[in-house]
């Protein structure tokens, strides 16, 4: 992984090397090994390098084609670059490095944007075509959004970066928060693509390209969404054939992603995805070379380290384990905003930061199981949505009346002093069942916040901005509209792949690993493995209530072959959560006092102080659990103080 940044100014303006230097320095954690810049009139490119393939100075970016008129900066990996290089060499292209980056400029020279259909990889690319009559700056982002890419187009200037921090070094970039994005952040615990937290700054959607030339700015897609236009499913009625196909696809993906000239390891939580990935990794790595990394917790109810240890023993990896406790998290909280360029309120980011820092001591690249849940129906929320989809035929009026009555009853029980997780879940369900349309229902399952009706959420934003955002309806209206007419399983799969995966799972992994100069690779999102998952009959994903059925079966077989117990393959999904509810009433109470002080909120003018005060009071009194929402408010305030003082 690396960091890229740059801009194309208006004609007649010259790119200033000092501006590029400042942009590069703002993302130096992403690339601790080297820095490079390039200017050509109004165009400037900057790069911070984390050396993975071809560690020589000749592979430092930007890189160019033979005559120097095509220049590229690149964050990511093109896993099939050796095959593409051989094809390009046969076509007459000459290479001076062994890096996958140089393949990109020659591929563009040969195929133009058609090269993207040939890439199997994860990438954010900025490419300057300085050839006479073609002068254009291109921005490109991989199909699943593994690599982040922000941009702003203002008064004829296009600026871009892997993170927001480099953009904030430019004087023409707005430092004003987008209050509609703030509203969505409170709902989802992340800022949803293509929005950003700053007014005027956007995220390039996954699978998209952006071009600025003399004709103006143009944007398009080069990759379809998962399931769009997919071929007819092959016959995989036979379970043995399906298992063999999954084993083959995952094994090939892992072998492609082990290509590196630096040490490679694997995250291992003890869950199905990371355990199956570890099995494939151990099979593909040289004997004795496989290394796995886990984080364990002193609180037994959250700890999976024992399961991870058993998996490591079964597949013969050299296992590294970090055991942490509440103090490790509490001490890390003040540092977290340094590593996240826009507000991010998934509390598991703390675990990801601790694991990434620990892993980087031994390796430079780590395989991650991200994407397995989305592709193979691993989340409980996915199954819940399938059940709720059956309510479409139930009249909306009676359904909403029942939900409202249930909500009032639960509020009454809470006022009488009834507490507990079941009450909280009941409130959440009552809130969800009051949905007005399918778009509102689907949106309820993207975020982690709840229960809090969207109308009340909007009132947390000061002035009219919150109510205006609420009145505009679902954030993902275009996506949700494209899901109409699909079968429920496909609809739910695409919803999670294009929202939660991009903006929570992958964003968290990217920022946490890049905080310490660690590259994360995601074999489950390999193009060929995803193509296999697209055509897999749904019964091999969810079967008789068992999620991720086929991956579990394959893991059980591999454990059995190693003489290990197979119960590890059939454990329910545990996930990780920290006891935010209790911490905010105890050790972290000071964060409520410091960051949600009504006087400070009133001076800032973003959040409605009376509404926030009510949330804090309800949480501290125990009449409601607002821990996720309070954490979101605190995260935003900490981020703003750090980046927009």
Image (tube, rainbow, N blue to C red):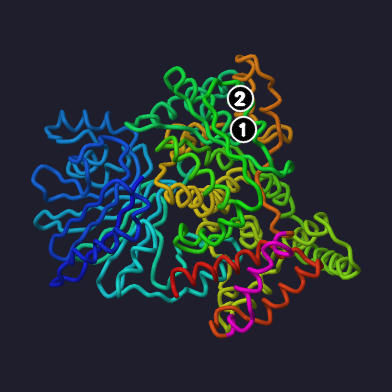
The answer to whether 338 is drawn above or below residue 618 in the figure is above
> Within 10 angstroms of label 2, few (less than 14), some, or many (20 or more) residues?
many
Is 178 magenta? The answer is: no
What kind of element bears circle 1?
helix
Residue beneath the point at 14% across and 36% down = 96
C-beta proximity under 8 Å, tags 2 and 1: yes
Residue 224 visible somewhere in the drawing? no
Residue 125 visible somewhere in the drawing? yes
The answer to whether 515 is drawn above or below residue 55 in the figure is below
Reading the image, the residue beneath label 1 is 272
Q: Relative to 359, is 141 on the left or the right?
A: left
The residue closer to the viewer here, 44 or 300, is 300
Q: Relative to 207, is 157 on the left or the right?
A: left
Is 587 magenta? The answer is: yes
The part of the chain drawn in magenta is 583-602
Q: Relative to 477, is 591 on the left or the right?
A: right
What kind of element bears circle 2?
helix
The x and y percentages for residue 637 are 55, 71
Residue beneath the point at 29% across and 46% down = 33
Reading the image, the residue beneath label 2 is 555
Residue 610, by quadrant, is bottom right
């Amino acid at each position: 992984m690396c960091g890229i940044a740059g801009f194309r100014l208006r004609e007649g303006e010259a790119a200033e090397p000092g501006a590029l230097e400042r942009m590069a320095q703002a993302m130096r954690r992403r690339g601790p090994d080297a820095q490079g810049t390039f200017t050509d009139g109004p165009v400037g490119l900057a790069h911070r390098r984390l050396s993975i393939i071809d560690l020589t100075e000749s592979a430092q970016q930007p890189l160019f084609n033979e005559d120097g008129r095509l220049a590229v900066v690149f964050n990511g990996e093109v896993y099939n670059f050796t095959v593409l290089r051989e094809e390009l060499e046969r076509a007459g292209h000459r290479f001076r490095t062994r890096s996958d980056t140089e393949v990109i400029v020659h591929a563009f020279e040969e195929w133009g944007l058609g090269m993207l259909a040939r890439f199997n990889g994860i990438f954010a690319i900025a490419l300057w075509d300085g050839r006479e009559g073609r002068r254009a700056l291109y921005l490109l982002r991989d199909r699943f959004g593994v690599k982040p890419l922000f941009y702003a187009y203002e008064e004829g200037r296009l600026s871009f970066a892997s993170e927001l921090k480099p953009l904030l070094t430019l004087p023409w970039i707005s430092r004003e928060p987008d209050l509609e994005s703030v509203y969505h952040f409170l709902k989802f615990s992340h800022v949803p693509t293509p929005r950003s937290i700053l007014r005027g700054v956007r995220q390039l959607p996954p699978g998209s390209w952006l071009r600025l030339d003399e004709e103006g700015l143009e944007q398009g897609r080069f990759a379809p969404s998962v399931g769009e236009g997919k071929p007819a499913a092959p016959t995989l009625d036979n379970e043995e054939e399906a298992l063999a196909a999954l084993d083959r696809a995952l094994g090939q993906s892992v072998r492609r992603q082990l290509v590196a000239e630096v040490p490679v390891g694997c995250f291992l939580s003890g869950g199905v995805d990371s355990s199956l990935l570890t099995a494939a990794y151990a099979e593909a790595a040289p004997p004795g070379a496989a290394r796995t990394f886990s984080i364990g917790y002193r609180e037994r109810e959250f700890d999976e380290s024992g399961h991870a240890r058993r998996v490591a023993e079964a597949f013969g990896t050299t296992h590294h384990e970090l055991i942490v406790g509440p103090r490790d998290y509490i001490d890390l909280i003040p540092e977290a905003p340094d590593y996240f360029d826009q507000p991010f309120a998934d509390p598991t980011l703390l675990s990801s930061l601790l694991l990434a820092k620990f892993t980087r001591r031994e390796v430079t690249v780590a395989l991650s199981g991200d994407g397995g849940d989305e592709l193979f129906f691993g989340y409980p929320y996915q199954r819940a949505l399938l059940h709720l989809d059956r309510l479409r035929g139930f009249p909306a009026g009676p359904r909403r009346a029942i939900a409202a009555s249930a909500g009032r009853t639960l509020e009454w029980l809470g006022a009488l002093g009834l507490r507990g997780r079941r009450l909280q879940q009941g409130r959440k369900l009552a809130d969800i069942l009051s949905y007005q349309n399918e778009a509102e229902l689907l949106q309820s399952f993207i975020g982690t916040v709840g229960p809090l009706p969207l109308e009340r959420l909007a009132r947390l934003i000061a002035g009219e901005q919150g109510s205006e955002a609420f009145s505009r309806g679902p954030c993902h209206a275009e996506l949700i509209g494209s899901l109409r007419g699909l079968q429920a399983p496909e609809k739910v799969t695409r919803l999670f792949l294009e929202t939660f995966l991009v903006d929570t799972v992958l964003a968290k992994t990217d920022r946490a690993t890049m905080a310490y100069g660690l590259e994360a690779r995601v074999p489950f999102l390999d193009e060929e493995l995803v193509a296999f998952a697209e055509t897999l009959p749904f019964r091999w994903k969810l079967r008789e209530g068992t999620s991720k059925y086929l991956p579990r079966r394959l893991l059980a077989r591999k454990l059995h072959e190693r003489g290990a117990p197979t119960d590890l393959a059939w454990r329910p999904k545990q996930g990780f959560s920290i006891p935010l509810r209790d911490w905010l009433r105890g050790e972290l109470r000071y964060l409520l006092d410091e960051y949600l002080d009504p006087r400070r909120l009133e001076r800032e003018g973003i959040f409605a102080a009376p509404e926030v005060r009510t949330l804090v009071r309800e949480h501290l009194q125990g009449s409601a659990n607002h821990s996720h929402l309070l954490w979101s408010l605190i995260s935003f305030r900490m981020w703003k103080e750090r980046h927009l003082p």
